[in-house]
Image (spheres, rainbow, N blue to C red):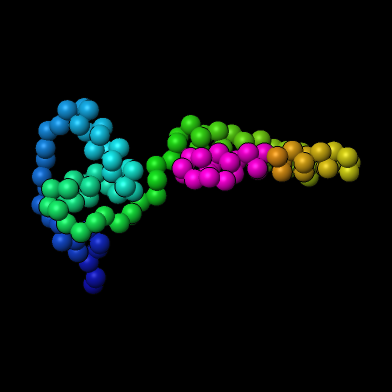
Amino acid sequence: MTTSGSEKRKRTSTLTMRLTDSEAALIKACADAAGVSASAYVRHAALHTKPLRKSRTPPLDRQAAAQMLGQMGQLATAFREVADGADQAEIAAVIEAVHRDLAEMRTVLFEALGRQP
């Protein structure tokens, strides 16, 4: 039987430290900017190990994610309404609105990921 990933890990010791709120916030912000966990960031800084490699995706802006979910719900509703029967003019208007909303969602996602559209 194979062991789980956590049983195979080499790092088995835990070290706890006390920080001020501002110190903790600074370490978390630096770790997020580097794309690694706070543990990996502190480990690298304290042990002067090889440079960090990004191991996580950038943190997502929760407000932007909630906005996107709301817009996706509106799009789903619009598609359901069109599917229930509409004339060509209504279908064209819905498709145009969906295209516009998708473009806006794309922009919001790029911004949340810290990238340029």
40 left or right of 97 in image: left
78 left or right of 42 in image: right
Query: Relative to the observer, which residue lies in front, 38 or 33?
Result: 33
Residue at 83% in and 42% down: 91
User: Which residue is at the far top?
Assistant: 21
Residue 54 placement (x, y as % from top left)? 33, 54
Residue 108 placement (x, y as % from top left)? 55, 39
User: Which residue is at the far bottom?
Assistant: 1
> Does the magenta segment cover residue 96?
no
Query: Is residue 84 visible in the rendered structure shown here?
Result: no
Residue 14 placement (x, y as % from top left)? 12, 48
Residue 101 placement (x, y as % from top left)? 67, 39
Q: Main secondary structure of the magenta part?
A: helix
Identify the image quadrant of residue 28. top left
Residue at 74% in and 38% down: 97
Residue at 59% in and 34% down: 70
100 left or right of 4 in image: right
Query: Relative to the observer, which residue lies in front, 114 or 68?
Result: 114
Query: Relative to the observer, which residue lies in front, 53 or 61?
Result: 53
Q: How many marks?
A: 0
Image quarter of the N terminus: bottom left
Determine whether 7 is above or below 64 in the image.
Answer: below
Q: Which residues are magenta?
A: 101-117
Query: Is residue 81 visible in the rendered structure shown here?
Result: yes
Residue at 40% in and 45% down: 58
